Amino acid sequence: MLEVAVQAQTSAAQTAPVQSDQKVIEVQGLCRYFGSVKALDNADFSISKGEFVAIMGPSGSGKTTLLNILSCLDSPTAGQYYLDGVEVSQLEEQKRAVIRREKIGLVFQQFHLIPYLSAVENVMLAQHYHSVPDKAEALQMLETIGLGDRATHLPSQLSGGEQQRVCIARALINDCAIILADEPTGNLDEENERLVISLLKELNAQGRTIAMVTHNPELGMVADRIIKVRYGHIESEGLDDA
């Protein structure tokens, strides 16, 4: 079953993603200060609908801080963040949580799975916060990513790659059009890294917009474009600078 799923993912990844000129993410003069530390300083860029963007930079460069703002987990000190044309940077936490729930799927390096819930129950938890849990739908999502036979397993009974794919299923279950991933293969071996990247490429080919934080240049090369961050500044954009 897993082999079939991987073959389907690889085939879909070879299909050109559907991009448009519509900007789903746009930041202008974005700053995030922690006391005297400028984690982000006057960042400007945009991401178009259907684009796969890698956000890269050394440790401490500000890329995770940037992703936290893009995912509405944090607010900037100054500047504007437009999501689907709506300025969301200074909204209160409750409103940001609604936007996050409705529009964004999050994939973390640390899987953040509930240890006493099965794979399918972890996926259903995302449904609970969004609307109404639907076990059949959650099972179908796990089946789609090649984990149908692992649905009743606890996180401790799953490999790192399987846990990360459960996280992706959880991010997708509410049909969010934007996927934000923070080092999604950071804890995986080479084989599982390949599986997760193939899955992300398939999702992009289906039209989802993906922004992925990574420090790995090889992973960055699977993206359409690289945004390089250094010392809180946008240093460069484009694949030539990888």
Image (spheres, grey):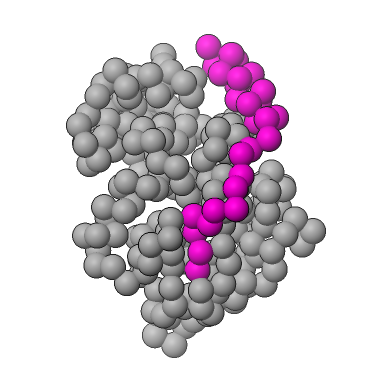
Find residue 215 and report its horizontal and vertical position in percent: 63, 56
Task: State the quadrant of the C terminus.
Answer: bottom right
**Residue drawn at (30%, 47%) of the image:** 101
Give the residue furthest to the right: 240
Residue 23 magenta? yes
Residue 48 visible in the current orientation:
yes
Find residue 100 and report its horizontal and vertical position in percent: 33, 52
| Residues shaded magenta | 1-27
Query: Image height check: is 205 above or below 44?
Result: above
Residue 210 visible in the current orientation:
no
Query: Image height check: is 23 above or below 135?
Result: below
**Residue drawn at (26%, 52%) of the image:** 98
Residue 8 magenta? yes
Query: Image height check: is 152 above or below 81?
Result: above
Q: Is residue 82 left or right of residue 202?
A: left
**Residue drawn at (54%, 38%) of the image:** 207
